[in-house]
Each structure stands twice: as C-alpha cells, then as structure tokens.
Amino acid sequence: MKTILIVDDEPRITTLVRDYLEHAGFTVITTGDGRNALSLVRTAKPDLVVLDLGLPEMDGLDVTRAMRRLSNTPIIMLTARGEETDKLIGLELGADDYMTKPFSPKELVARIRAVLRRAEGARNNDDVQLAVCDLSIDPTRMRVARGDQVFDLTSTEFELLLTLARQPGRVFTRAQLLDAVRGVAFESYERAIDAHIKNIRRKIELDPREPRYILTVHGVGYKFADV
C-alpha cells in the first residue's frame, strides 16, 4: 500500500483529499507545516507528496527546494496562485506535476496514480543500458552518469531524458514529450516541459547555457544530439 503525505494548512482541503485517497486504497499522512513535512519525508518515507505552495512560514517552494536535497520522492504541487511563474519555479525546483485550486479530488487521485505508475515503471524498466554521447543511461536503475559522475534526476526528468536519448536526432514537440511522461500537467501545459528540460540541463550539461545533449529546435521542441 502506497503512502501519500498531504501538506496543506487548510483543514477542509486536507480532510477532503485524505478521504478520497483512503477510499482509493492509499495510506495518508497529513501536516500543515512545511518543516514538519520535511521531518516526515525523512522518517515516514512517503511514496508521494501532495504539497500546497501557500503554506505559512516555510512556503511550498522552500519545502520543494529542501525536499530535493533529501530525496527524489515525487511531488504534486497544489496552488491557488494562477500566475505562470509560480508553476514554472515549482517545476524547475523538481516538482513532478501541479494542480490549481479549486481542483477535483478525483482528478488528483488520477494524477497521483499516474505519477506513481511512471516512477514505478522507471524503476522496473528492463531496457538495456544506453550509451549516448559520453552519457551512460541505465533504465533499470534510473541512473545517469558521465564517467564516474552520477546525476540525480527525478523520475519525470529521467523519463524525459530517456525518451529523447532513445532516438538521437529525432525532434520531439512539447506535446509529444508531455504524452511520453503522462501525469505531468494534464492540462497540456507545454511550458512544463521547458521547465523540466531546464532542470535536466542544469544537472547534466557542462554548461547549461550551451547544451551538448538536449538541443532546442526553435518553434518545434527538443532533440537529443545526433550521435
């Protein structure tokens, strides 16, 4: 049974989401405090975190930033903010998906299942190891390395990189990449892909401003460099 940590300071929302998740067969932990959430990530080791950005004191973006120093546990952000920049910042910090309040609890359950399936699928992938450019990509271990340097990618980032690296030179539109990592931005928020690509580049490129691996095809999308 998967464990979900809900981090939200609105009791009505916490109760509603907990009821839906428990009915769907999940174990649920709740807190309305960002610092306590980080402690629970360390001790309870949830399988996924549903995280409100508008927390008091330590907000959701700070929690996301701190969480990514601890683990790659999938994060779905909840936000009442309609501003695009908040969503992009959260995604660039390593969140896997987002939902804007008010939201459908049934859709949240569906997204949680989709993100968990992707994370589980990445771990159980039986594909052979790829060697592209000077990168080694091991799908069975979700491991990306250049020589002795190992890069720590989230499951969403890993799936995006793997999708591109499997077909070097092929140009993928943002919509195609969204489809490849189902569960990210069901609203077809294509700029979510830009945020994840920026994050991957920051981690694996020697100079993210002059990428060698994931190249932008202006007006279309992205491709992995021809080998």
Image (spheres, rainbow, N blue to C red):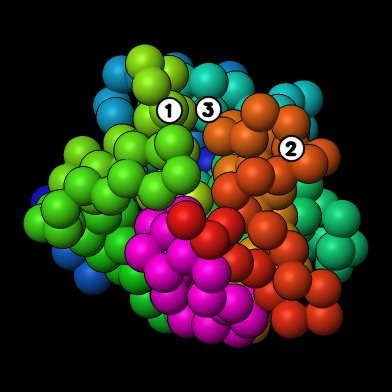
Residue 71 position in % (x across, y down) = 41, 27
Q: Earlier in the sequence, mark 2 or mark 3?
A: 3
Whether tag 2 and tag 3 are in contact, CB under 8 A, the answer is no
Residue 146 is tagged as: 1
- Residue 173 visible in the current orientation: yes
Q: What residue type is labelled 1?
A: Arg
Q: Is residue 12 visible?
A: no
The x and y percentages for residue 3 are: 25, 45
The picture quadrant where one finds residue 113 is bottom left
Q: According to the image, label 2 marks what residue?
A: 208
Quadrant position of residue 209: top right
Residue 67 numbered tag: 3
Q: Answer with left or right where residue 7 lies relative to residue 142.
A: right
Residue closest to the eye, 132 or 186? 132
- In this view, 162 is above or below 138: below
Labels 3 and 1 touching (C-beta < 8 A): no
* Residue 124 percent coordinates (x, y): 13, 53
Disc 1 on helix, strand or loop?
Answer: strand
Q: Residue at x 60, y 23 (%)?
A: 66
Element marked by disc 2: loop
Answer with the quarter of the image where residue 29 lies: top left
Whole-number angstrom distance, CA of label 3 to CA of label 1: 25 Å
Q: Specify which label sits upstream in the sequence, 2 or 1.
A: 1
First-in-chain label (3 vs 1): 3
Q: What stretch is highlighted in magenta?
A: 159-182
Circle 3: element type: helix
Report, in whole angstroms, how far the alpha carbon at label 2 lies from the one at label 1.
Answer: 15 Å
- The stretch drawn in magenta includes residue 201: no
Residue type (three-letter) at the residue carrying disc 2:
Pro
Please provide percent x and percent y for residue 170: 52, 75
Q: Is residue 165 magenta?
A: yes
